[in-house]
């Protein structure tokens, strides 16, 4: 059987052995990926910092899925890592060949929502691991791919178009945080597919976790230079036997005080996180197994840092548990990057309102709470009247200004607990928790009046006014998402039919007639 190898037509230089210092850089060049717009470059840089190794490739399921104008991005970086983000389509032929080779060698990348291969050199068959022959491995420009993880990429209607894959030239374990981050990154790509352009607001983030060499001879040098906090506790006494110098840099507290009183470990933990943190530690003790927990600490100056703490049991030769040891990592930057990714994936780029994906998730949550607390919930659909005429007469920039102004008014008038989302075009939705028919009609009527009074400046002395048509539906304990939106849409149609610039409320549905 021939080796699964992807060569590049332009490379005539002799290949270096896989794993050599320049192998990652050569692999980046081998993909022959052209320069592309800054938005894609930002995603690539973020991926590089979050995963700290490997190429990041978006593989389309087939050629018909190619996005018009898409290309690929190549990011120069450390010679120890492959750093690129490739949109594999008919433009990037060599990069597409990489995607096709991956699909052939690892079909699970396109069959599963999440696929992980920690070490491509070993495969599990019948519960037993066996070594994969060298001629069956995937090689790109002479460099063997040793580890990969992939997450499905879908269109807004749920159709799968491809897989976002992280590749590495060395085996690696893929933890839950890395897979969550890869899923968040895939959500950003999905949003770009939906809006047809790359985000202009993605901020760079950096990964903060370092590797610990197991060698005892290098341990002291490592812990003094590292920002990871290494710790060891005694099972019998409950005392802290050791904490590395990084504790004082991360916690901003004295290591001596922690060694004198183990209770000082718990005190800085955020009050809302203490119970889960203690529960994870005790579960590790009781089960004599490794544990992992994420929590916040409060610094002496009131600042907040996010910590990922991993612990594992230490046994004697006869199996007796004597210590727990572990490493605590400051993941504040990683947490911030993940939150930025999540916000980007759930926010309408133009107006800053929630997008349809986030709206539906929050509506389901609010409906569940409304039914549990036996309190009504109001859902209102809002449509800008004659919006097409604004676009036709003044241009799309004017239309964008009107959309943005409407959202600003909605946010300025509504409560922090209310939900404002843009469903698409000039259609918005507002969710008012704990609001009955009278209260919702009053609030939306005031909003309608305020919008009609505002003139949106267009420059050069021109301005345009806008009005809204509104349809409201009130929930009952048996209401579901589809039923509420259907009734709100019918009420919106009534407002438009009756002359626009008005609020209509859908008739209530008895609980015994609403969907269960």
Image (spheres, helix red, strand yellow):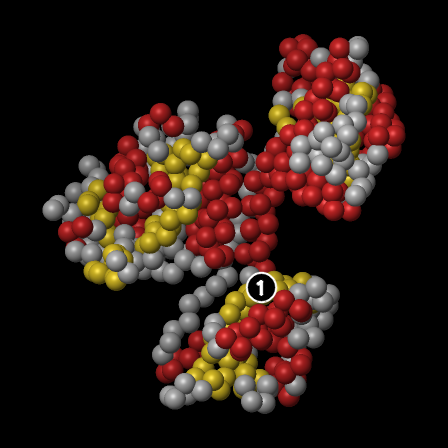
> Quick check: 143 above or below 439?
below
Q: Which residue is mark 1?
A: 294
Q: Quadrant of residue 301?
A: bottom right
Return the residue nearer the eye: 227 or 293: 293
Residue at x-position 19% and y-position 37%: 9
| Residue name at image x 51 percent, y 40 percent | 188
Q: Quadrant of residue 210?
A: bottom left
Residue 465 can be seen, yes or no: no
* Residue at (79% x, 10% y) in the render: 499
- Report crowding for label 1: few under 14, some 14 to 19, many 20 or more residues within 10 A (C-alpha): some
Q: Considering only vertical position in the picture, is 445 above or below 94? A: above
What is the x, y in percent for residue 467?
78, 18
Q: Position of residue 437 (x, y in %)?
A: 84, 30
Task: Residue lying at the far left in this picture: please name it.
Answer: 1
* Left or right for 39, reference 496: left
- Asked whether, in this view, residue 406 is left or right of residue 34, the answer is right
């Amino acid at each position: 059987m021939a080796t699964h190898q992807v060569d590049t037509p332009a490379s005539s230089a002799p290949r270096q052995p896989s794993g050599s210092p320049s192998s990652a850089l050569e692999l980046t060049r081998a993909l022959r990926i052209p320069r592309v717009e800054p938005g894609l470059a930002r995603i690539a840089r973020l991926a590089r910092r979050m995963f700290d190794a490997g190429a990041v490739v978006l593989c389309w399921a087939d050629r018909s899925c190619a996005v018009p104008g898409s290309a690929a991005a190549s990011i120069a970086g450390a010679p120890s890592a492959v750093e690129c983000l490739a949109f594999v389509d008919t433009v990037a032929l060599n990069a597409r060949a990489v995607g096709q080779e991956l699909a052939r060698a690892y079909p699970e990348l396109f069959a599963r929502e999440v696929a992980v291969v920690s070490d491509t050199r070993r495969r599990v068959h019948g519960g037993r691991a066996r070594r994969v022959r060298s001629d069956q491995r995937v090689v790109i420009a002479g460099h063997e791919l040793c580890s990969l993880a992939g997450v499905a990429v879908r269109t807004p209607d749920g159709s799968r178009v491809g897989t976002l894959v992280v590749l590495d030239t060395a085996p690696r374990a893929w933890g839950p945080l890395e897979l969550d981050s890869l899923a968040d990154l895939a959500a950003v790509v999905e949003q770009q597919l939906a809006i047809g352009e790359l985000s202009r607001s993605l901020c760079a983030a950096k990964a903060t976790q370092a590797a610990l060499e197991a060698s005892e001879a290098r341990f002291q040098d490592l812990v003094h230079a590292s920002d990871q906090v290494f710790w060891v506790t005694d099972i019998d006494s409950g005392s802290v036997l050791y904490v590395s110098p990084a504790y004082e840099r991360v916690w901003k507290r004295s290591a001596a005080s922690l060694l004198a009183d183990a209770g000082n470990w718990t005190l800085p933990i955020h009050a809302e996180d203490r119970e889960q943190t203690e529960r994870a530690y005790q579960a590790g003790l009781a089960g004599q197994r490794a544990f992992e927990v994420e929590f916040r600490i409060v610094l002496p100056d009131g600042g907040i840092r996010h910590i990922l703490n991993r612990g594992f049991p230490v046994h004697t030769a006869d199996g007796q548990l004597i210590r727990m040891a572990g490493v605590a990592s400051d993941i504040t930057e990683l947490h911030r990057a993940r939150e930025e990714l999540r916000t980007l994936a759930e926010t309408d780029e133009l107006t800053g309102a929630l997008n349809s994906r986030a709206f539906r998730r929050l509506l389901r949550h609010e409906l569940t709470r409304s039914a549990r607390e036996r309190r009504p919930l109001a859902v209102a659909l809002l449509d800008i009247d004659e919006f097409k005429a604004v676009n036709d007469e003044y241009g799309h920039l004017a239309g964008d200004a009107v959309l943005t102004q409407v959202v600003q008014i909605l946010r300025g008038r509504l409560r922090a607990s209310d939900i404002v989302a843009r469903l698409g075009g000039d259609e918005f939705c507002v969710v008012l928790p704990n609001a009955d028919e009278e209260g919702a009609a009053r609030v939306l009527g005031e909003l309608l009046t305020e919008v009609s009074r505002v003139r949106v400046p267009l420059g050069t002395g021109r301005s345009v006014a806008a009005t809204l048509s509104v349809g409201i539906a009130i929930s009952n304990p048996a209401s579901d998402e589809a039923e509420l939106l259907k009734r709100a849409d019918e009420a919106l149609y009534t407002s438009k039919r009756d002359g626009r610039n008005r609020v209509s409320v859908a008739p209530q549905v008895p609980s015994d007639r609403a969907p269960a």
